[in-house]
Amino acid sequence: MTATLPAAAPPRCAASSPEMLRFRVAGMDCADCARSVERVVAALPGVDTARVNFGAATLTVVPGAGVALPVADIAATVARAGYHAVAETGMQRGVQITAPPWWRDDRLRWVLLAVALWVSGIVLSYTGYEATFVTALFAAAIALGGWPFARAGWQSALAKRLDMNVLMTVSALGAALLGEWGEGAAVVVLFALGGALQARTLERTRGAIRGLMALSPATASRVDETGGETLVPVAALAIGDVIRVRPGERIAADGVVIDGISAVDQSAITGESIPADKAPGDECFAGTVNGPGALLV
């Protein structure tokens, strides 16, 4: 079969080129966040290209010719934008990272504390409690719930990009200047809570994607025009290459069978409990397990 790379996987070129740097980025919960990270990193001296895969939460940095970029500088730049970047090594790629339980999620804990302060302020305001104390509760809720997107908004403003973090920061400051502490706290807390819950949902989705990506083997047996086989990294495969899949091996890339008959376990991809019969002309998926027959892909 003719090999093609999996459509769902993020670009693998970072693995084939030692000059490229790849990071996992935590805290991105919107496409604007990803674009902000791209922009601030791309503005660094010596950076040729910066690309963020929002679905996989990865950052790929291509330095300029002959430039050695310090990993710490890139991580620090991402941190100033309000996110956390960790450089990947070759052994870490494909390793699934499980999101911590909610009670260990620092961001969610701060947001829940902000919610508690906001709700306390509302309750006390209706009981005639001292206005100064109620205002202090609302102000604390704004500070705790709003500092992540305020920091991200500041970096977006420095990068001359107007995103929702900038708009939320302006709205919170405007409410405070007008003395509408309760309304400002409500906007900030609800926005922060929604963002924190969305981030946890995205991290679970990303974990599932990484789990599927980890099923794909790191190498493949590429067959040349003379029938000879060469063991190559999956990242080195190109459209039109032919690979051999022996019985019991995982298929290294999406493709179409050109020779051989077998049954392939596709349960991890399609959910089918029974192996699917494969013959010339049938499609196969990367990460699925070949059965008793040998295939040319």
Image (cartoon, rainbow, N blue to C red):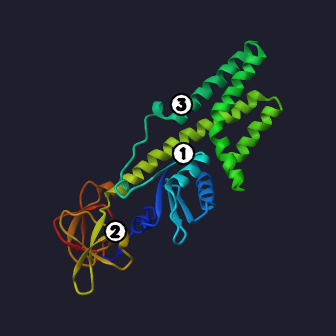
Give the quarter of the image for residue 220: bottom left
> Residue at point 23% right, 78% down?
229
Lower position in the chain sequence, tag 3 or tag 2: 3
- Disc 2/disc 1 C-alpha distance (Å): 30 Å
> Could you tell me if the residues under marks 3 and 1 are in contact, i.e. CB atoms within 8 Å?
no
User: 169 above or below 89?
Assistant: above
Using the image, tell me which numbered label, if any, was put on residue 27.
1
Label 3, secondary structure: give it: helix
Q: Which mark is residue 176?
A: none
Residue topped by disc 3: 109
- Check residue 234 in the rendering and tell me which mark sits there, or answer none: 2
Place of residue 251 in the rendered image (x, y in percent of width and height, measured from the top left)? 28, 66
> Could you tell me how far apart the alpha carbons at marks 3 and 2 are, in whole angstroms?
41 Å
Q: Earlier in the sequence, mark 2 or mark 1?
A: 1
Q: Nearer the viewer, residue 21 or 57?
A: 21
Quadrant the C terminus occupies: bottom left
Residue 159 % position (x, y) = 69, 56
